[in-house]
Amino acid sequence: MFSTAFLDLPALQGASGTVTLPGSKSISNRVLLLSALCQGTTVVHDLLDSDDTRVMLAALRQLGCGVDVQGTTVTITGLGGQLKHHDAIEFFMGNAGTAMRPLTAALAVLGGDFTLKGVPRMHERPIGDLVDALRLLGCSIDYLGNDGFPPLHIGKPSLKLDAPIQVRGDVSSQFLTALLMALPLAAKDRNIVIEVVGELISKPYIDITLNLLARYGIVVKRYGWQRFTIPQGCSYQSPGSIHVEADASSASYFIGLGAIASGNGIRIQGVGADSIQGDIRFMDAATQMGAQITSGPNWLEINRGAWPLKGIELDCNHIPDAAMTLAVMALYADGPTTLRNIASWRVKETDRIVAMATECRKLGATVEEGQDWLRIHPLPQGQWKAASIHTYDDHRVAMCFSLAAFNADQVPVRIEDPKCVAKTFPDYFEALFSVAHASTQDIPVICIDGPTASGKGTLASRVAQALGYCYLDSGALYRVTAYAALQAGLTLEASDEVRISDLARTLPVRFEGDSVWLGRDDVSDAIRTEQAGMNASKVSVLPSVRISLVALQHSFQRLPGLLADGRDMGTVIFPHAPLKVFLTASAAQRAERRHKQLISKGISTTLDSLRADLEARDARDSSRSVAPLKPAQDALQLDNSSLSIDASVAQVLDWWKAKQPF
Ligand code: DC
């Protein structure tokens, strides 16, 4: 996951390949709650690991359910409709509507002493219609803040179930879902009838609920979309094990990607055209706009068809979440696209009509908006602007605007707070980068070099972290090469140059976090000794070894960008890098830093001898004929003798930001 303050997407050119999508949020949280209400144990496969499901799992644990998480397989031991604890419990619901609504209903019917709270935005998301319905049926619920909104307190109910229970259907279908999942708890000795008042929105989500209830032994009778009967005597039966489909709304970004990006097509694994999720109908809207889609069990394949895309006019009531993706696709169309019947966007994670309009305008688009509709005009070549997209703590805003990076003007797109995708798709950007490609010249590289012990490694990896960029420690490549050569019984002298360079050309080296692997061996410690540094220095003066490592170093230039640390990064390997930094620090300072480092490792040395060593090495490094230590002509010099690491990182980031068009 990218936890950076922002993520800059370079201009993207095309996309091909396969993505495997995480489990659906809506299905995951419904399955968790239903498994919790059952008697016995349910093994849930392919569960989404996200903020929303974590909120639900935490709540279930608080209620006394057995919860055993093994990767994406979670085993739930249910309550059997009976609470194990009767103490006061406070639940924190974050911004997870799919946990808040159904838990409110289930807890209100079960009864107890419960407080449900969330983040400030959750306290602005309406819940009054659900509370009204629950109160009518005898539940005890109080508002702890503003009427109609969380936080809530739930007490013990005295249930009155004879009259039909009425619930409004035109604000959020989650209210009806919540009642449908909770009321079987109270249907032991009577039928329970729920009536929807007003037009029911987001009907496909109710279909998911009914479908899953049936898997758990509750067959609800439906009369149109107005009246639902939960049959007397029904009870939750564990299906034993259940698979969660991949999220059809998440699929929309890759369907959109396949429709927009040139390439050999995108294959989506985990969900097919026969999905029980309503958002799968996004396929039809994308097809209307020009995408070519084929499908089989659990997979979809998308290719670019009509180009530019075709502007459409669509009632989006049946695909409220996925329809946001259409708004960004609309920028690539031949005429305006009008999305109608999207009033529910106003009460989602943020007011999505305002958010989509505002951010599309930042890109340069003309957008019209009404109470429940949005019209987006296409953005012709020459009018795209590099924009910093605000994401409003809304995962879908972040994900759908990533598609703007395919723009014809090849301007980059900045996504603010990219970690907000964690709500449903923590590795969204990793998945995007695994299929999207950019021109090499568009993938930014920052080079950092400097004399030994100047702190360039620390600085480079910290800057890489702050930007979410890949990191190339080129010194480590020379260290690994020397290590591998010695392992192979070679000397590090010129006489073995050809064999060392052959070895370097196919070096099976991998960087994983802070670890460096050579084939199956973790060589992180072995290559970081003083001796390994000396050995690296020896092989690094062999010209054909340097040439052999060029392709490997170039392969690190991957999306979304690269921080390259080492000797000739800015001069030979990435001469066009837009930012090159040359660190300087006095020999005295560097000796002191190295001294501290060695002492902390339990290695005793003296400051004077270290300083003498450093000065000798500087002289050798700057005067050697092969790849001498010298700043690139266009490098910015940073003397960090009296700067903290944080201050040096901030300086490099400032230089970098000043070069960006945002
Ligand atoms: O930065 P370091 O101490 O890990 O580097 C080990 C040796 O490799 C050092 O002698 C410099 C050399 N080197 C090089 O010649 N070219 C690079 N790009 C990186 C390191």
Image (spheres, helix red, strand yellow):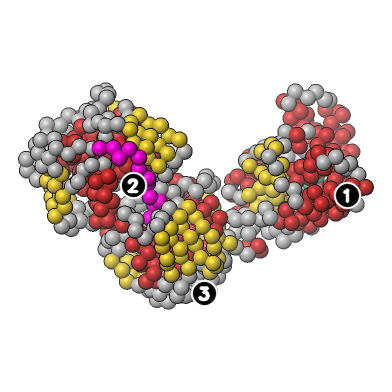
- State the extent of the magenta-drawn residues as a range: 237-253
Judge from the rendering whether residue 556 lies leftward or rightward of residue 326; answer left or right: right
Which x, y percent locates residue 637?
75, 50
Q: Which residue is mark 1?
A: 497
Judge from the rendering whether residue 249 lies leftward or rightward of residue 419; answer left or right: left
**Quadrant hosting ligand 1:** top right
CA neighbours of label 2 inside 10 A, class few (<14), some (14 to 19), many (20+) = many
Residue 241 lies within the magenta run: yes
> At 31% from the left edge and 57% from the top edge, which residue is drawn?
278
* Residue 457 badge: none
* Residue 381 badge: 3
Q: Amino acid at mark 2?
A: Ile
Q: Taking the image as drawn, is residue 172 in sight?
A: no
CA neighbours of label 3 inside 10 A, class few (<14), some (14 to 19), many (20+) = few
| Disc 2, SS | helix
Q: Amino acid at mark 1?
A: Glu
Marks 1/3: CA–CA distance: 52 Å
> At 23% from the left edge and 42% from the top edge, which residue is drawn?
217
